[in-house]
Structures are given as C-alpha cells and as structure tokens.
C-alpha cells in the first residue's frame, strides 16, 4: 500500500515520533538512543529557546497503519540571516529500508521548505549546532555517542538515490589517552602550556560544584566562548540564554567537574574551555533511552561506580584572539593527567568540520584514529 504522511499534532504523536527511532534500532549494538525526556523538551517551545528564531514541524510516515519513518522540518531564521541563505533543514530523519518511504518523507520536507520560500534543503541538522547533525557515512561498526547521530548504511544510499549531494562533511576521531604504545608526542602539550601560561598570563580555573558554575552567571560567560569561537563555522547561529539553560540542565548533572577545564586571563575572564564526560553510551542502551522507571540506575552506575573507559569530548572552544597561540595546550596539559588517573583509554572527539583545520590540528601530538565520517546533504529546490 501507499505511504501516508501524517503531521505530528498531539503529544501522543510526538511520543510516537520519538519512539520510532528506539524501535528501528532496537538491539543495534552501535546505536545510542536519545534520552526520551530530553527529546520531549527539545520539541517543546516552552523549554527550547531555539523556537524563538526557528520554525519546526514534525511528520510521520505510515504504511498499513504502521509507522515506517519520521522527519523533522526546520528553518533556523537566525542562521539564514547570519549566512545570507534561504535554507530549510531536515533532521531526526529515520526510515525503513524502502525507497518509497524515504522518498515520501523527503518529498514532504521539500514541499514544506517551498512553502516558506526556501531555495535549498540541507540535513540532517537540528535547530542549532548543539543538536546532533550529520548523517553517518563511515564508521557504522563504531559505538555512537549520546550527542551524535547513528544511522544504518542504507541511509546515505537513499539520500543519493533521491538526488541529494554533499554539502559538507565532518570527521570524528578516537584520541588515545597517553600510555605505553600510545604515547605519541603528548609531552609537547606540557612544554607549550608552560610557555603560553607565562607569556600570556593565563591560568586554569577548576570548579568544586555546579552551583559555583551557575553563580554570577558564569555559565553564560562560558557559552560566550563557544558562541565567539564557533561563529565562523558552517551553519552556526548564536546560542541564546534559554538554550544555554536547557543544555546546562541537560548535561551539568551528568558532569564530573574534573573534566571541565577553563582557561582564564589575568582578569579572570574565560578565554578557552573544554568539557568532557564519561561515556554514557552503554548505559543509555541498557536504559533504552528512558530515565524511568529504572533507566536512572544504569546512568548513575556508569557515572559513579562502573565508569566507561571512554571519555566523550563535548565541546572545546578558544576565543578567536587566542587561537593559534598554543592556548589549547593548557586545556590538554590539565586534562591528560586527569584522564590517565581516572582510567580512560581513549576519548571520542566531537565531530570536526572538514574545513576546520585549526580544530583538527590540535590533536597532532596525540595518538589519533579517524574512525567516523558524517555528511550534511543538500538539494536545490
């Protein structure tokens, strides 16, 4: 029978939209489910500040009364103004291995984009860069993370069959914590850090509690570093305070503060930051993406008692005026001994744009394996 597309109009529809991914990837050893409660907040205009400058509608694909696909249609007006584009985005796209289903979903997204006078459809992307983006095109046999997309190998084949082409790619790396067999030239970070510390009068700031980060609005100063350092990157739009509050509430309670490193100048203003956390990928798989009734137990165990050997690097940012001056060496010189002491074997690096040589080159003195690539596709309308 033909594929039927239905707009998400109720809370029950939204639950179906979120859960479809869980059903499609049930028991997949590499996929990591989104936390259900976080997804409800993501698509709630009252809780997600991105709705202040974004349009969004969600759609489900049905065949014979059964859900066979989903897609979110989005427009980030702030990004379009910043980059002088008229782009619409598709995101949170999933479908069974059936070209008719993927065609129906993309046809819907294209028609929706034309209604808003957009001239290009790109994706998969989220509301902003803090949402997962980029379709996996290499590394299907690698464990995913809680902040990136996993998809089956047939996804990019479908996109290309429907006339979509590459817009830009990201790469991801395993970054090995220095130990015998993986030393590389990591001691160089310590030598450079000492020189930069003295030359630029910089110091490391560490925190004892989440309250300390939130007091005095320091959290907003940290995200100012992210806004300013990420501003030149593809599709980026400035993160507002409501978004910061959402992501702080989403991640801070999971964070081991030893893995938050901030570099400050002589005025105690942040100029660089790095955030990592013990991987929750296996815990989220066991929890099946839900905190309740028992999912919280798997997450707590992974955070405090049976920590993963993987550290996920969530964000690394350096203010533009401090880039190419060795400031990132201060971040690494602080976190490398901590990662060794905590028993981590390697870090999962965040996706790096193919055009972002500065970010890619910062790992030059560590043992690194490029193990995943992902792609933003585009189609002119």
Image: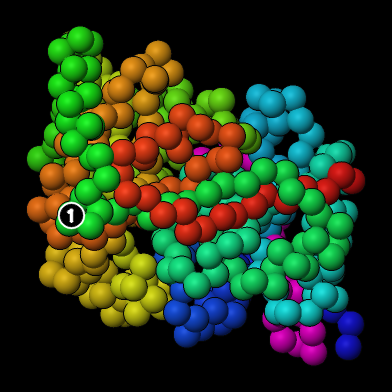
Q: Percent from the top left, x then y, of residue 140?
A: 54, 69
Residue found at x 57% / y 47%: 170
- Above or below, 238 against 268 in this view is below
Of residue 126 and residue 98, the one placed in the foreground of this image is: 98
Is 117 included in the stretch rendered in magenta?
Answer: no
Is 68 included in the stretch rendered in magenta?
Answer: yes
Q: Percent from the top left, x then y, of residue 205?
A: 16, 28
Can residue 255 be seen here? The reply is: no
Count of numbered circles in the view = 1
Residue found at x 19% / y 41%: 335
Which region of the structure is painted magenta? 47-71
Of residue 81 and residue 156, the one placed in the foreground of this image is: 156
Left or right of residue 190, residue 95 in this image: right
- Above or below, 269 against 348 in this view is above
Q: Residues within 10 Å of mark 1 (few under 14, many from 20)?
A: few
Can residue 193 be seen here? The reply is: yes
Q: Main secondary structure of the magenta part?
A: strand
- Label 1 sits on a secondary structure element that is loop
Q: Quadrant of residue 293?
A: bottom left
Q: Percent from the top left, x then y, of residue 174?
A: 38, 55
Q: Percent from the top left, x then y, of residue 165?
A: 79, 51
Judging by the rendered image, the residue that carries numbered circle 1 is 179
Residue found at x 82% / y 42%: 120
């Amino acid at each position: 029978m033909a594929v039927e597309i239905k707009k998400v109009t109720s809370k029950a529809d939204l639950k179906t939209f979120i859960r479809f991914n869980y059903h499609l990837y049930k028991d997949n050893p590499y996929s990591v489910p989104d936390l259900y409660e976080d997804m409800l907040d993501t698509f709630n205009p009252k809780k997600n500040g991105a709705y202040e400058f974004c349009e969004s509608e969600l759609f489900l694909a049905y065949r014979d009364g059964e859900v066979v696909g989903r897609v979110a249609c989005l427009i980030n007006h702030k990004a379009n103004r910043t980059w002088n584009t008229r782009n619409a985005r598709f995101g949170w796209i999933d479908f069974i291995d059936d070209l008719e289903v993927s065609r129906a979903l993309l046809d819907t997204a294209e028609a929706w984009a034309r209604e808003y006078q957009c001239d290009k459809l790109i994706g998969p992307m989220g509301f902003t860069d803090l949402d997962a983006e980029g379709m996996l095109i290499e590394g299907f046999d690698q464990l995913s993370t809680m902040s990136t997309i996993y998809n089956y190998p047939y996804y990019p084949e479908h996109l290309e069959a429907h006339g979509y082409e590459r817009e830009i790619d990201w790469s991801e790396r395993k970054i090995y914590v220095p130990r015998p067999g993986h030393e590389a030239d990591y001691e160089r970070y310590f030598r450079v850090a000492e020189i930069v510390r003295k030359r630029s009068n910089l110091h490391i700031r560490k925190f004892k509690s989440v309250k300390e980060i939130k007091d005095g609005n320091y959290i907003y100063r940290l995200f100012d570093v992210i806004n300013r350092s990420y501003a030149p990157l593809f599709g980026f739009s400035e993160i507002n305070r409501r978004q910061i509050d959402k992501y702080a509430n989403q991640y801070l309670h999971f964070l081991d503060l030893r893995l938050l490193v901030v570099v400050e100048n002589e005025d105690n203003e942040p100029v660089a930051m790095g955030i990592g956390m013990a991987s929750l990928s296996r815990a989220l798989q066991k929890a099946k993406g839900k905190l309740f009734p028992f999912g919280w137990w798997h997450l707590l165990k992974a955070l405090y008692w049976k920590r993963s050997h993987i550290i996920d690097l969530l964000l690394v940012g350096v203010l533009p005026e401090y880039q190419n001056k060795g400031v990132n060496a201060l971040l690494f010189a602080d976190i490398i001994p901590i990662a060794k002491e905590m028993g981590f074997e390697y870090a999962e690096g965040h996706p790096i744009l193919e055009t972002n040589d500065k970010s890619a080159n910062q790992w030059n003195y560590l043992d690194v394996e490029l193990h995943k690539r992902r792609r933003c596709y585009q189609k002119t309308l």
